[in-house]
Image (cartoon, rainbow, N blue to C red):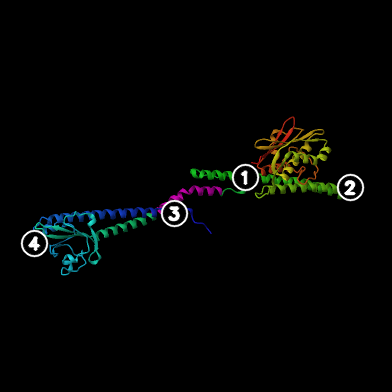
Amino acid sequence: MRGRSLAATLALAFGATTLAVFVLVGSFLYLALEKQIKAQDNLDIVLAARHARRLAEELDSAQSIRDHSERLTSVVLGNEALSMEVFDPDGRRAIEHNMAGALAAPDAASDAATVAGLPPLTRVAATARITETDIGDWTGRGGAPIRGIFTDARLRNGDTASLLVARNMSDRWRLLDRYRDKLNMAGVAGVALAMLLGYLLIRAALRPLRDIAASASLVTVNRLHTRIAVPRVPSELETLVASLNAMLERVEHGFQRLSRFTADLAHDMRTPLSNMRGAAEVALARPRSVDEYESLLASNLEECDRLSRMIGSVLFLARAEHPQFVKQLREFDAGQELTHIADYFEGLAEDANVRVRVSGAASVTADLELFRRAVSNLLANAIRYTPPGGEIVLDASASADTVRVTVENQGQPIPAEHLERIFDRFYRVDPSRSSLPSSGLSQGSTGSTGLGLAIVRTIMELHSGSVHAESDGRSTRFVLMFPRAR
């Protein structure tokens, strides 16, 4: 199933983030406006109530309230949302201005014409200061939201009149509703625009990735030398490009090694097969004696042994390079193991007229069978190239961080240009590719298959160690470096 577009995913995430920001900002603005409007309306109601009470306190009697009605109602003139009712000391309504819809009662004949018909409001005493906390809320006719103050006023003759100053809040709620609707519309439009612009910007920002993919698609088996080359790569992708190019370089190097290995393997396997075929063809050219046929079979058997050793070495290298290759690490005395290996090769050394001497001692943590195989390969190689009467020295020593195992032999020095390449598979310094019979050790020499030193290097890599060769006019030394166990 095709995955979701990265650009679309990021655009959706960007849109969701923008929506969340718009909701928070819109809510803040809405609540701030509502609070500001409410504060302003509260101030208008309080000021109107104070002014009306002060004007009422200048009147002499209840009749004066009716006579100066215009003076009192002037407090709320100019604002259609403000209303006023004034009640005489007997509780009867004396003045009414713009109260339509402010009270729930339908007409003046109802109880609304008296103080008893008013909403249940806190009554402010004539001597108390009018503040915003005295404002009450109720629902007027038709469900209109009303806010107001009910206060007493002391007339000059000592009687107490009552005043109701109210404000119809319907216009304010309609204003807030329109403002909320505009915020919603702006939010939806903003989110849609943010998603569209985000998608376009993200697609543009991801263009280097598409260029990298297009460049990588040019790499084929026949063009492993091709590298990813994208102009003006963002700094965040420079590491990716460098890693991909490094990976392609490793793949090319590995492919070249595999090609060389395949070619060398085919060449080395063709030689014993050609020998066997040639010998068989010569033998079949005319009748032969029993001794000649036995000699032919013995020669073919040696070539079969050589092929068997070669195939076994190749299989070992293939298994050793597998990530799940199992090593059985344990601690043992390297000096004692060198002695055992030297004893095993004693007969082969005597046949080659060379001496094998063991020196040193060190404790090493490694796979014992792999250790024996590595040293055996080096020792067999040393016997092959040590001149008669020469000496081979096996030495073990330890330092703070490593255990050093050295196989040193006398003989012709190895040219410096060959010291690193001799560990490559099927690489030989000796162009004659001479053959040495098998030692018979199951983990030992690989003869002249050209894989012995490659196996040694692989074994050391399995132990996180290293191997290198040193050669001068005095001797040639192969040094195994094992890390010490922590």
Going by the image, does 72 lie left or right of 285?
left
Query: Which quadrant is home to the C terminus?
Result: top right
The residue positioned 84% from the left and 46% from the top of the image is 299
The residue positioned 87% from the left and 47% from the top of the image is 295
Is residue 212 visible in the rendered structure shown here?
A: yes
Amino acid at pointer 4: Gln
Residue identifier under label 2: 292
Amino acid at pointer 3: Ala
Q: Secondary structure at mark 1?
A: helix
Upstream in the sequence, badge 2 or badge 1? 1
Residue 286 rendering spot, x and y as whole percentages: 89, 49
Q: Is residue 353 positioned above or below 40 on the image?
A: above
Amino acid at pointer 1: Glu
Marks 2/1: CA distance? 50 Å
The residue positioned 62% from the left and 47% from the top of the image is 222
Marks 4/2: CA distance? 157 Å
Is residue 232 visible in the rendered structure shown here?
A: no
| Contact? badges 3 and 4 (CB < 8 Å) | no
Q: Which mark is residue 13?
A: 3
How would you rate the neighbour count of disc 2 (Cα within 10 Å): few for under 14, some for 14-19, many for 20 or more?
few
Upstream in the sequence, badge 1 or badge 3? 3
Marks 1/3: CA distance? 40 Å
How would you rate the neighbour count of disc 3 (Cα within 10 Å): few for under 14, some for 14-19, many for 20 or more?
some
Upstream in the sequence, badge 1 or badge 4? 4
The residue positioned 15% from the left and 60% from the top of the image is 162
Residue 374 rendering spot, x and y as whole percentages: 73, 42
Please identify, in this view, whether the residue under mark 1 or under mark 3 is nearer the observer.
3
Marks 3/4: CA distance? 72 Å
Q: Which mark is residue 252?
A: 1
Residue identifier under label 4: 63
